[in-house]
Image (cartoon, rainbow, N blue to C red):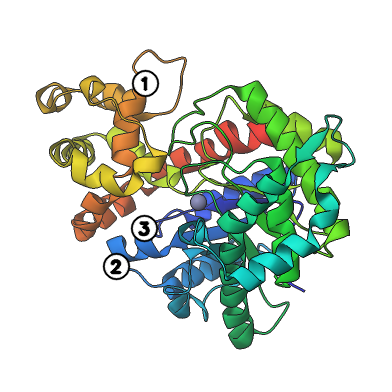
Amino acid sequence: MKKLGKYSMGMGDRFGHQGYAQLKAIMEAAKNGVGITPVWNKSNREHMIIGTQPQDVRKEADAVTGAAGFTEPYFVDADHINLDTVERFIPASDFFTIDVASYIGKRADDSKIDTFLDRVKKYSGRIEIPGIKRTIRCSADQLWGIAENYLYAAGKAGEIYRKIEKSKGAGNFVTEVSMDEVATPQTPLELFFILLMLGEEKVPVQTIAPKFSGRFNKGVDYVGDPSQFAAEFEEDLMVIDHAIREFRLPSELKISIHSGSDKFALYPHIGSILKKHDKGVHLKTAGTTWLEEIIGLAEAGGEALDFAKSIYIQALEKTEELCAPYADVIDINVKMLPSAGLVRAWNSRKFASSLRHDQSNPDYNPNMRQLIHVAYKLAAQDMGHFSRLLDEHKEIVSQCVFDNMLTRHIKRIFL
Ligand SMILES: [Zn+2]
């Protein structure tokens, strides 16, 4: 069976230029004794916006691992697919993030709800989960609510899984189920029953991505109470452990953190809880690499700096349009966005330090960073120019990508 390592990282490389730099960060971690399975993920939305095919990600992953002599497993993730979008990802992918978010809240058939409620009767009242000290109460009403919210979605996860399995064969790919792109977080109790449902559907889920409480905005730090997150995260790990035994799920099953890049306030908690319980994690850091490309171009100066500025200035004019699809995962205070006139006068250092996620630098502007995060479409519209600049300034850009992965991410969680 295809298996992820204990630690794995989802790395997005939207424009397909930075796979080698990302892999080098993974290899550097290995030299320091920490094995991390690289997973190149790209969602349908990203493919549509950029005009690429899932095969392009496969080609890049095969090429960079081959060139680096990387002999450990690596994966290509069909990120956030559903029944409508999975088809074209099947040949090139060996990791599937089955996104059930859009099915949550839809009601399953009464007969299915009745069967489920009958199955979970024994949990009514209170649930004991080894490792969780507090009493978890679970009323009949709660069970009913969980059935109404999640049973249909779990059924869809089963349907999508079976569709992939039919083409690829069981065991030839990794299955993740994601529920993060919704407004309401899932509690550890809900996670427990969702895993039960996935077990009933016989989905061999290896990673599960719940929505945690607090805001996981793209490319910036966590907004919320990190100690509350830590308590919830630790309970989720205990729930997963228990669910593996109770519901015959794969022993590899681990938690997946989406929009996991740049959550610096959480990393010390995540790192210490994983070590305390000797657990693994899948951390998705997708869009950060694109930001590093813009930072690298800004640092390169000249025409490249002008390009970075023009992306920002165009984004400023299209803020609403660019942000709309990402409403649940960004929070931009438009009043804090520097004006086009101001930015035109900036030098390399000022632009790069406004964008780079270094909270100790007074220039750092998380509003500008989030806006550019969702503005990659604008570079896609000027692809020839963008690609040429990335090639011309390969060294400086790949250094930014490498440093970001290794220093700000891998070192803070895993080392
Ligand atoms: Zn996600």
Q: CA distance from mark 3 to mark 2?
A: 10 Å
Q: Position of residue 38 (x, y in %)?
A: 62, 56
Say what secondary structure mark 3 lies in.
loop
Say what secondary structure mark 1 lies in.
loop
Q: CA distance from mark 3 to mark 1?
A: 25 Å
User: Does 345 sit above or below residue 387?
Assistant: above
Q: Earlier in the sequence, mark 3 or mark 1?
A: 3
- Residue to which mark 2 is pinned: 51
Q: Position of residue 63 (x, y in %)?
A: 52, 69
Q: Position of residue 167 (x, y in %)?
A: 59, 87
Q: Earlier in the sequence, mark 3 or mark 2?
A: 3
Amino acid at pointer 1? Tyr
Residue 338: assigned label: none
Q: CA distance from mark 2 to mark 1?
A: 31 Å
Regarding residue 155, the answer to whether it shows in the image is yes
For the image, the number of numbered tags is 3
Residue 15: assigned label: 3
Asked if residue 297 lies left or right of residue 72, the reply is left
Q: Quadrant of the N terminus?
A: bottom right
